[in-house]
Image (tube, helix red, strand yellow):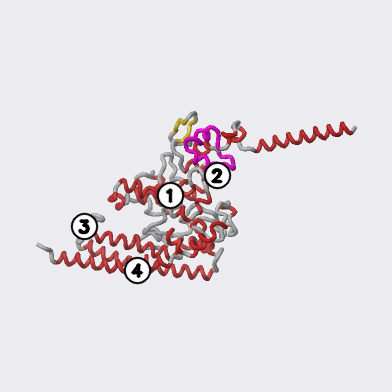
Amino acid sequence: MSTFRSVFIAVILATALIVAALLINRERPALDTERPEADMVAATGRCATCHREETPAIVVEYEASRHASVGTSCLDCHGLQDGQESLDHRGFTISASVTALNCQQCHSSQYDEFLRSRHAAPAFAAVEGAEPFTEEQVAFSERYHPGAVDRPPNTLARLEGASAIASGCVSCHKIGQPNTDGSIGTCTSCHSRHLASVELARLPTTCGQCHMGPDHSQIEIYEESTHGVLFNAQRDEMNLGADPRRLTVADMPVPTCATCHMSGLGGVGVTHDTSERLSYWLFAAVSERRPTYVQAQDNMKAVCGNCHTANHTDAFYEEAEAVVESTNERVLEAKDIMDGLYEADLLTPAPFDEPIEFTYFDYWHYWGRTAKHGAFMGGADFVQWHGNYQLLAQLVELRALAEELRTRHASPTE
């Protein structure tokens, strides 16, 4: 009897183990179960076999990605979508170019939010104007950003030349480039191609690849600010890869660019529309309130409320808006000087062919923007020495150059 009992128990246990193994195997991603060789399933089959030799870094990055951990295969992202040019690649038919349309398969809400942002069509139109876009794309974007896409190509960029545009301007502005498949932009500008990293997109230095320099010095301002200093001090303690839907201050007690402009902290909801919480057109020569001023400011203040009292945040906004107001006044004074010169025919209609035109452009495009951005991002030095000091000094220079032109016109040389 004991022998029978032992055999019976052994059979039951063996059966249970087999059933468990089958159940576990059923839950494995297809890329594991359909690729019999271990060196193939490490990434995604035959793709990894070649690319591990030819471009090994992309295989390593993919294997470290969230996509790999949930069983997303190479063909899931590189597979041909409607409207895309096909490429026959070693027995596979893939898309000749992966675009936002490929990402949209799984991340449709993020793509829709992105389309409403200035990172989409307005970014590329700032260089190339409306011509590359369809009428439907222009009309869609103009609903959210009037005048941002329905515009001519950038005059200064054209004067700088095609090589400067290709290697300079478009390197950043292509984030909103229209694709031949009807989509706009590329998600990999922020997330990288094969790592597809949330952590990378949250790093200030990722945003700083484009948001830097004298005309939009956000990364320099951030690094000077208290936020930037605290981030550098606590970087190793933060969970930058946390799921955006479940992100808390325990993961990121110090804000980065993405925290303020995109995260759901404060109960405002996660968004890929980086314009959503902006209350002013700070990039403009004269900055006015956006149509969504009240809601945008309320949402941003809700994020601030994770660390600051309402009184503190309200006072911060009042000070920043005072800088916007004073900067507008100075820019308008400089504009009056330029308008007077044009009306008196002391300047040619051609753009950027006389020194004073560059001085005026720098005045609002560099120093004016810097003062305003510095005020809203906590960069005291950028409000002062890189902003208001330059506004003061360059206004004196503008007046002197204008007076020189008037004197020269009144007393022409033989």
- Residue 280, image x, y percentages: 42, 62
Q: Is residue 163 left or right of residue 19?
A: left
Residue under the point 59% across and 43% down: 69
Kindly identify which residue carries mark 4: 389
Q: Is residue 44 magenta?
A: yes
Q: Position of residue 330 (x, y in %)?
A: 33, 68
User: Residue at label 1?
Assistant: 120
Quarter of the N terminus within the rendering: top right
Question: Alpha carbon of mark 4 to alpha carbon of mark 3: how far?
Answer: 29 Å
Q: Amino acid at mark 1?
A: Ala
Label 4 neighbourhood size at 10 Å, few (<14), some (14-19), many (20+)? Answer: some
Residues tagged 3 and 2 counted as in contact (Cβ below 8 A) = no
Q: Callout 2, which amino acid?
A: Ser
Residue 269 vs residue 387: left or right?
A: right
- Identify which amino acid the numbered label 4 is placed on: Tyr
How packed mark 3 is, by other alpha carbons closer than 10 Å (few <14, some 14-19, many 20 or more), is few
Q: Which residue is mark 2?
A: 65
Measuring from the top left, give residue 341's x and y in whole percent.
Answer: 22, 63
- State the residue lying farthest toward the left: 414
Which residues are drawn in magenta? 43-72
Q: Residue 143 shows which numbered tag?
A: none
Please give the name of the residue rendered at 26% of the width and 56% of the height, measured from the top-left corner: 352
Q: CA distance from mark 4 to mark 1?
A: 34 Å
- The residue drawn where x is 21% and y is 60% is 347
Q: Quadrant of residue 409?
A: bottom left
Any magenta on residue 116? no
